[in-house]
């Protein structure tokens, strides 16, 4: 049976199972330990007769082992039955642990090593005063074919030619995730989803921040004239060839935007965001943000 004590004694195996080194795992555990304890205490009944600690004991009482279950599941994305054999606990317990940690990790996104965190876009300027450039992009993940025809139409992506869920992220110029939107059906266009998020309003309040997006955000400069938003210049029917200066400008923008693509690559090292998503679509946003939390922490620890 896998336990933190035995797996951490083999660092190479630990990294392949979890996606983090042992020191990074312990840093993550320490950052959520207080929140985990509060969440545990919030479940206690106020009119309980037994003392706290009475009743049936947890199969995995240690926080290290419970967090290990979640990270192994996110990194490898096996079935609950496979996890049951790996950890020696019932698959219903595995399910409860996943449901316990996904909202816990999704609450906040760590953005510096001093322990300060953000929960909204309004806090960005306070914690990152030198924020001058942000990158915006969307990613899609395949889901199983819905049974209902109306649902199939809603989630079918014309771009991917598959049924998908779409999420947009906002990063700084180094690729650190600053904000993630709620997930949307794959049929929704990137720019339409962008307009429904709080990002345009935040950019209007901070005109000194330059945003970079891909060609999917056509029309943003017309709809939001106060926003400093840069997108590539596209060829049109009237103008079939770009000038040399336009090509150079597009190349410079692509070199800046590549950081957000690298962020997606780091996130999709966790198979729960790369394979066909089998879990409930209602929990997808929490799963996505929890992986973003882990990826941010790993990026910050490795940039020291």
Image: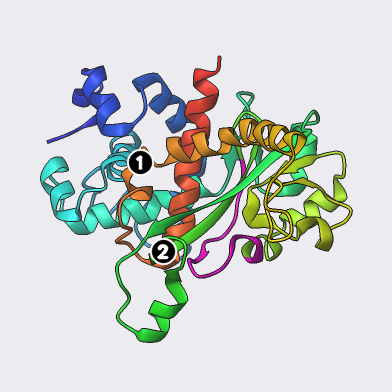
Check if residue 180 falls in the magenta segment.
Answer: yes
Q: CA distance from mark 1 to mark 2?
A: 17 Å
Q: Report the residue at 56% width, 14% height from top.
A: 304
**How far across and how far down the image is residue 139, in percent?**
50, 52
Nearest the viewer among 283 and 238 is: 238
- Checking the image for residue 270, the label placed there is 1
Nearest the viewer among 299 and 146 is: 146
- SS assignment at label 1: loop
Residue at mark 2: 164
**How far across and how far down the image is residue 260, in percent?**
57, 38
**How far across and how far down the image is residue 293, in percent?**
51, 40
**How far across and how far down the image is residue 273, in percent?**
38, 49
Q: Is residue 164 above or below residue 243?
A: below
Question: Which mark is nearer the camera, 1 or 2?
Answer: 2
Residue 93 picture quarter: bottom left
Nearest the viewer among 213 and 235 is: 235
Q: Residues within 10 Å of mark 1 (few under 14, many from 20)?
A: many
**Is residue 89 something one can see in this rendering?**
yes
Give the magenta range.
178-192
- Image quadrant in which the N terminus is located: top left
Q: Residues within 10 Å of mark 2 (few under 14, many from 20)?
A: many
Q: Is residue 9 above or below residue 278?
A: above
Marked residue nearer the N-terminal end (1 or 2): 2
Nearest the viewer among 92 and 124 is: 124
């Amino acid at each position: 049976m896998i336990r933190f004590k035995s797996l951490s004694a083999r660092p190479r195996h630990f990294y392949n199972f979890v996606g983090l080194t042992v020191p990074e795992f312990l840093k993550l555990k320490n950052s959520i330990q207080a929140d985990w304890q509060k969440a545990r205490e919030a479940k206690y009944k106020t009119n309980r007769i037994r003392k706290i600690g009475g009743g049936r004991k947890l199969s995995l009482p240690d926080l290290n082992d419970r967090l290990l279950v979640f990270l192994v599941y996110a990194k490898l994305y096996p079935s609950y039955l496979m996890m049951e054999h790996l950890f020696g606990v019932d698959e219903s317990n595995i399910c409860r642990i996943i449901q316990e940690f996904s909202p816990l990790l999704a609450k906040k996104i760590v953005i510096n090593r001093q322990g300060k965190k953000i929960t909204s876009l309004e806090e960005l300027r306070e914690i990152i005063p030198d924020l001058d450039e942000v990158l915006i992009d969307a990613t899609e993940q395949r889901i199983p074919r819905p049974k209902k025809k109306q649902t199939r139409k809603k989630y079918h992506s014309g771009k991917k030619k598959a049924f998908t869920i779409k999420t947009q992220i906002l990063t700084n110029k180094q690729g650190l995730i600053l904000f993630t939107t709620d997930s949307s059906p794959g049929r929704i266009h990137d720019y339409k989803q962008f307009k429904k998020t709080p990002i345009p309003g935040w950019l209007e309040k901070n005109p000194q921040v330059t945003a970079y997006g891909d060609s999917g955000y056509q029309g943003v400069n017309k709809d939001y004239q106060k926003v400093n938003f840069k997108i590539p210049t596209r060829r049109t029917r009237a103008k079939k060839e770009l000038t040399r200066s336009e090509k150079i400008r597009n190349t410079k923008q692509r070199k800046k935007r590549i950081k957000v693509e690298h962020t997606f690559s780091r996130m999709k090292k966790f198979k729960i965001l790369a394979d066909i998503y089998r879990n409930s679509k209602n929990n997808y946003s929490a799963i996505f943000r929890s992986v973003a939390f882990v990826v941010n922490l790993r990026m910050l620890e490795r940039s020291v």
